[in-house]
Image (tube, grey):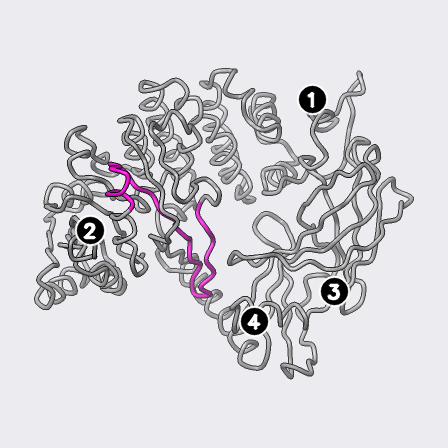
């Protein structure tokens, strides 16, 4: 079956005050070929030039239909519902005005849907960090290409994929079950829509093709709803959307409802906690909202969550206000989790959070070594090495017997890690272990070029610790001292290699490398652009 004989797709594009970007989104949908019978662009009463851009495109492209709303809906749900109502294709695909469909996305989704007679088909999506074009896979490993899920209850973990835009929907399926988005100003409307879809128990087919590119513009003057977390209202909206989704799923299947609540503890809660910031007023409001919501969870769902999430819940329950060491808690919420010193024991010898807040860290002594929230500090040791210190954790690492440490450079855009040579660890006077780990930035830059990283390369820097008992643990590095200084290094290959170590939002070490004069200039310009955008946002 060639593309011209495939059943047709209606692509629904929603736009509000996005005149500068909506044309690229619409063009990416039109470029899908004859499988897309129509692109329905819903202009949500924009006050800029969005209406003009869409009308001009429609005058040139007969497949583009424009719906102009006379009143702004306040959210994304109502314009998507308008698009569903206007659609005539057998299938419906959603696209936001600041994102794009990669070539062949609609074709791949339809072929998979038809092959497996699936009302819902899902494909791969990436979060593309702009302007650097770093692609971060969305929910990697959740879906297996070629897989067909007969009932969502057979794969409860599907509740973790809350995107509506990486999926193709049979329009008859949407109509049969009355599946629509929440109307009006309802943030995180896709949580509710995807819950309604799963509750309808469709067969779901999976294609391995990339079907959606989600553009992330963190330095934009007006960031997307999901990134606009400057006040606690965003978190309140997320909780309410999650509460609604969990109720819908629980009514359809207790198993799906439970999986949804566990997902909140392991994903949503930890994501917002590690970005909590330093504003005491925000922290207090966030803490109160979160305590109140988590108190509604069945105990069985809390017990089903990972140990690190359970400890966070225990701390929430233990105090009505954020603890003084809140930053330490944000590091426990990071990925991978890190429990920073001090390591305190209670009267019975059990691990507890702190002397001020002696909440027992239940289950820590039984965790496999690979799941321990180990902390490793790093400081400079010359131009081409770091000195690390591996902290013990209530004697658990000492039991395993750390032997070697190995630096790992993981491309932030996704891809295979680059491993340095393992180095022997030695016990230190503080009860931990230390080593000096050399690395060659020029060699790393060459490898990055081979992997397609051109003008600027971004790497997460981690370390793997191998133990005498055969176990191992991998974690990120906590930068110390003058490790974050930018350096311009002479290079026989590139002339100059600019290295910019930096601390991520989760407090871990990362590294930007800019090979050659062009790369260094690009990095400097990008930094200036971010600074200007930040001043403009203020």
Vertical side of 398 occupied by 361: above or below:
above
On-image quarter of the C terminus: bottom left
**Label at residue 449:** 4
Q: Secondary structure at mark 2?
A: strand
Q: How far is mark 2 from mark 1, CA to CA?
A: 52 Å
Task: Answer with mark 2 or mark 4, whichever residue precedes in sequence.
Answer: 2
Task: Answer with mark 4 or mark 3, whichever residue precedes in sequence.
Answer: 3
Task: Answer with mark 3 or mark 2, whichever residue precedes in sequence.
Answer: 2
Q: Secondary structure at mark 3?
A: loop
Q: How far is mark 1 from mark 4, CA to CA?
A: 47 Å
The span shown in magenta is: 112-138
Task: Answer with mark 1 or mark 4, whichever residue precedes in sequence.
Answer: 1
Q: How far is mark 1 from mark 3, CA to CA?
A: 39 Å
**Label at residue 439:** 3
Residue 506 shown left or right of residue 252 in the figure: right
Q: Which residue is under mark 2? A: 11
Q: How far is mark 3 from mark 2, CA to CA?
A: 48 Å
Residue 49 shown left or right of residue 458 in the figure: left
Q: Which residue is under mark 1? A: 360
Mark 2 closeness class: few <14, some 14–19, many ≥20 residues within 10 Å = many
Q: Residue at x 15, y 35 (%)?
A: 172
Query: Where on the picture, by quarter, is residue 340?
Result: top right
């Amino acid at each position: 079956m060639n593309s011209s004989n495939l059943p047709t797709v209606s692509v629904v594009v929603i736009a509000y005050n996005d005149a500068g970007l909506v044309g690229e989104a619409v063009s990416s949908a039109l470029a899908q070929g004859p499988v897309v019978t129509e692109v329905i662009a819903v202009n949500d009463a924009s006050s800029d030039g969005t209406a003009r851009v869409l009308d001009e495109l429609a005058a040139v492209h007969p497949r583009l239909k424009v719906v102009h709303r006379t009143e702004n809906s306040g959210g994304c749900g109502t314009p998507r519902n308008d698009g569903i109502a206007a659609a005539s294709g057998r299938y419906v695909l959603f696209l936001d005005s600041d994102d794009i469909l990669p070539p062949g996305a609609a074709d791949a989704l339809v072929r998979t849907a038809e092959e497996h007679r699936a009302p819902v088909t899902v494909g791969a999506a990436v979060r593309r960090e702009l302007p650097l074009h770093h692609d971060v896979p969305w929910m990697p490993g959740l879906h297996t290409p070629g897989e067909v899920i007969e009932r969502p209850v057979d794969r409860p973990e599907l509740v973790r994929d809350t995107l509506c835009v990486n999926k193709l929907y049979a329009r008859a399926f949407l109509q049969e079950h009355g599946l629509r988005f929440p109307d009006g100003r309802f943030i995180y409307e896709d949580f509710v829509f995807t819950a309604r879809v799963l509750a309808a128990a469709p067969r779901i087919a999976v294609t391995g093709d990339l079907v959606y590119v989600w553009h992330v513009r963190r330095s934009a003057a007006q960031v997307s709803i999901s990134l606009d977390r400057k006040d606690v209202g965003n978190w309140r909206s997320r909780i309410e959307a999650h509460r609604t989704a969990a109720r819908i799923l629980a009514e359809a299947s207790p198993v799906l409802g439970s999986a949804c609540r566990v997902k909140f503890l392991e994903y949503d809660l930890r994501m917002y906690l590690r970005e909590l910031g330093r504003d005491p007023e925000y922290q207090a409001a966030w803490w109160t909202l979160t305590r109140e919501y988590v108190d509604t969870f069945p105990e069985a769902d809390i017990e089903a969550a990972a140990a690190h999430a359970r400890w966070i819940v225990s701390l929430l329950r233990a105090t009505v206000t954020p603890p003084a060491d809140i930053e330490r808690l944000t590091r426990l919420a990071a990925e991978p989790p890190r429990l920073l010193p001090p390591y305190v024991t209670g009267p019975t010898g059990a691990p507890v959070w702190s002397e001020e807040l002696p909440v027992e860290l239940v289950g820590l002594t039984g965790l496999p070594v690979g799941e321990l929230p180990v902390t490793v500090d790093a400081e400079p040791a010359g131009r081409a090495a770091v000195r690390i210190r591996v902290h013990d954790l209530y004697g658990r690492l000492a039991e395993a017997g750390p032997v070697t440490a190995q630096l790992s450079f993981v491309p932030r855009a996704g891809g295979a890690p680059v491993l340095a040579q393992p180095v022997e660890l030695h016990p230190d006077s503080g009860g931990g272990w230390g080593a000096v780990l050399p690395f060659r930035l020029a060699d790393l830059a060459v490898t990055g070029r081979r992997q397609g990283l051109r003008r600027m390369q971004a790497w997460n820097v981690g370390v793997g610790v191998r133990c005498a008992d055969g176990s191992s643990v991998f974690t990120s590095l906590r930068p110390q001292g003058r490790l974050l200084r930018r350096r311009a290094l002479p290079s026989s290959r590139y002339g100059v290699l600019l290295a910019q170590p930096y601390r991520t939002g989760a407090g871990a070490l990362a590294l930007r490398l800019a090979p050659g004069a062009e790369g260094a200039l690009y990095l400097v310009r990008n930094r200036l652009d971010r600074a200007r955008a930040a001043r403009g946002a203020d």
